[in-house]
Amino acid sequence: MATFFKIYSTHSMAFIMLVVVLVTASLTITGAQTTGVGVCYGRLGNDLPPPAEVVALYRKQNIGSMRIYDPNQEVLQALRDSNIELMLGVPNEDLQTLASDASAASRWVQTNVRSFWPAVRIKYIAVGNEVSPVNEENSQYVPFLVPAMTNIYRAIVEAGLQEQIRVSTATDTRVIDTAFPPSAGAFKGEVRSFFGPIIDFLRDTRQPLFVNVYPYFAYNDDQNNIKLPYALFANPSTEFTDSGNNLPYQNLFDAILDSVYAALEKAGGSSLEIVVSESGWPSAGRDAATTIENARTYNQNLIQHVSRGSPKKPGRLIETYLFAMFNENQKNPEYEKKFGLFFPNKAPVYPINF
């Protein structure tokens, strides 16, 4: 090695060192993106830091992707030139207007997308969150979801950004009737007619489906049959082999995810990819499983797991957004205030490595 370096001039060595510095800097900035893990930036708190400080914290922690739930202009301004990829949300309460008026969708895209692109790296638009007939809190928005998705997508096409920005909606696993074993995954009868047009839209426009996946809730609802290590990615070996597809399952996250893939296949959506738009574990507030150590274990193991894919999609990166960046004191019920990776003062709730 000494002989190799001696043949280079001082100028050549300076150039090499510059390249090394630039490559290293690039890896520092974009490293979190290669892990496939981002973090949801919820803002239901009256003690949260200003958006500019939040963006700085994302960069400091090497978090390369962010999800926000509405087009807050201060947040979008703070994201300019940050190199953070963004999942931008359309709030449920805006769906009716966007569904009924294509020009309103065009204005929404002009104001919240084109005004910031490409300085803000908008990657996804999530039109609505957890809208379905089985979610009583959001069921009133069911008639407007697909028309709003369609109008937003058309506005993105009009803007010439359809190759850069993908349009979908975020659902949750309450729409799944049978989830065990994963190969038996199927949509509930009362959501099949609702989900059919969503699948048609996503398949025809080649968009992914966003799914909020929470092993914590599945574990909490069935602690007699679900082991905590299985829910925390801490199982030392295979928990079971699915007799329907002969695939081994070692953690609950994969089992839930693959049950959604199975349901999509049965409903004509076998070509669709899934982006996990939320997943997390509370650090306090509900039961013996809501501890700082369990939250740290789940989230750190999830970060390390996503690059491996699931048994049904081995080796395929599972793009995932952790929920959430901060503990939010205005969320309800009480335990939902404790999903944060950070306290509002920006101190970590527990150590985690991106």
Image: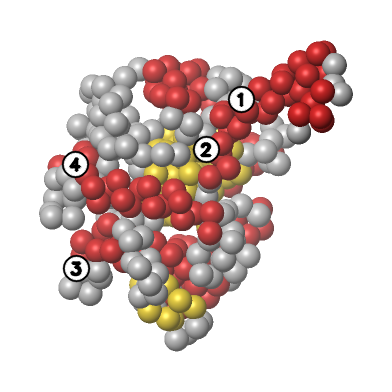
Question: Which numbered disc flags the more N-terminal residue, 1 or 3?
Answer: 1
Q: Nearer the viewer, mark 2 or mark 4?
A: 2
Of badges 4 and 1, the one in the foreground is: 1
Residue 210 drawn above or below residue 183: above
The quarter of the picture where residue 335 lies is: top left
Q: Earlier in the sequence, mark 2 or mark 4?
A: 2
Q: Do the CB atoms of the residues marked 2 and 4 lie less than 8 Å apart?
A: no
Gap in angstroms between the C-alphas marked 1 and 3: 45 Å
Q: Amino acid at mark 4?
A: Asn
Distance, label 3 to label 4, CA atoms, is 23 Å
Q: Residue at x 23, y 23 (%)?
A: 46
- Circle nearer the N terminus (1, 2): 1
Q: How is the image coloured?
A: secondary structure
Point 56% across, 29% down: residue:
28
Residue topped by disc 3: 223
Query: Which residue was labeled with disc 1?
Result: 25
